[in-house]
Image (cartoon, rainbow, N blue to C red):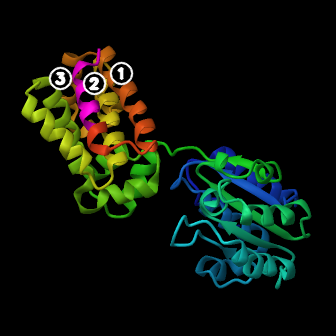
Amino acid sequence: MIDAFDAIRGQDAAVTALRRVVAQERIASAYLFEGPSGVGKEQAALALARAVIGEKAWPRIRSGAHPDVRIYRPRDEGHRNIRVEFLREEVLRHAEYAPFEGKNAFLIFPEADVSFPEIHPEAGNALLKTLEEPKAGVTFVLLAERPQRLLPTIRSRSQPLRFQRLDGSVVEAILMEHGIDEETAVIATALSGGRADKALWLAEEERAQQLFELAMRVDEVTADHRPDALVDVADELAKQEDLRAALEGLGAYYADLARAALGVPDEALAFRHEAGPIRRRGEKLGARRAAARVELLTTIFEDLDANANKGTAMDSLIFRLRTAR
């Protein structure tokens, strides 16, 4: 017998909970799937619909053609939040008459924290009224990377289910299945933060290799202390297509140096394809200094989120990396 949840990897706790509610026929009126993007939340929402509605409906569910399974993504323009007019005229009107073919219908909202942010509460408040008076057989599934951005009342009306970052072995296996060569898969996995979507993006156009080389260059320059090189590498960081990815990659590199300095085996290093250089540099830098740089890199995101000037922020970062102890 086909299990709709078998294809979901690395989310044992969430899958176990979903299997249980399906077996007990106790489907809630609203769920909040919390966790990073690219870890299987949307896949799990579709699997829930598949398990409840039935295997025969799966081809249409998968293709988006089933009337009882609708996916509503954020709009493309502006702040991307769903307009209250669209919610009332399209979404809630559909929910009022659903289900159409069976006993259950599922309305799925990827990036619900973008569609219904607390700072633009109109649509969220309209949705809340429906969640407070749920219709039998209709389930709302909200997927959120940052659930705290939703209205507290929406969170309280939804059953939470936590999705974790994926283990590196799972991400690497997904990349290999997509035809990514082993070295690129290793680097992209190390830089992905446990997210398959990010790993696949990094594997394209040599992004992973470029970010790894940038991390090594930043480390080399901050060790060298040449003022002109420090200015150049700070400028290079500020001009990155995805600055957050570059900084997260730098943090992953220093975390690996800390592991190497502590003597972990080569196969336990994130960048195991360069285990020799990583180990030599880690032993020279030392675990304490490498860890201090990882901690420093976690704080830089606060400056960026506060809309700090990228150039100024990167100048400051390079100086602090040079002096981090």
| Quadrant of res 179 | bottom left
Residue at mark 2 = 320
Which of 191/312 is in front?
312
Left or right: 238 in relation to 296: left
Q: Which mark is residue 280?
A: 3
Say if 313 sits above or below 195 in the image: above
The N terminus, quarter of image:
bottom right
Q: Range of the magenta residues? A: 314-325
Amino acid identity at mark 1:
Ala
Q: Residue at x 39, y 61 (%)?
A: 177
How far apart marks 2 and 1 lie (CA) works out to 13 Å
Left or right: 197 in relation to 314: right
Magenta-drawn stretch contains 47: no
Left or right: 69 in relation to 113: right
Mark closest to the chain's N terminus, 3 or 1: 3
Q: Residue at x 80, y 51 (%)?
A: 153
Residue 103: image location, x then y, percent: 87, 76
Assess disc 1: are there few (<14), some (14-19) or many (≥20) residues with their C-alpha within 10 Å of its C-alpha. Answer: many
Residue 61: image location, x then y, percent: 66, 78
Mark closest to the chain's N terminus, 2 or 1: 1
Amino acid identity at mark 3:
Arg
Element on which disc 1 rests: helix
Q: Residue at x 65, y 54 (%)?
A: 119
Assess disc 2: are there few (<14), some (14-19) or many (≥20) residues with their C-alpha within 10 Å of its C-alpha. Answer: some
Element on which disc 2 rests: helix
Q: Nearer the viewer, mark 2 or mark 1?
A: 2
Mark closest to the chain's N terminus, 2 or 3: 3
Which of 95/188 is in front?
95
Q: Residue at x 21, y 23 (%)?
A: 322
Residue at mark 1 = 291
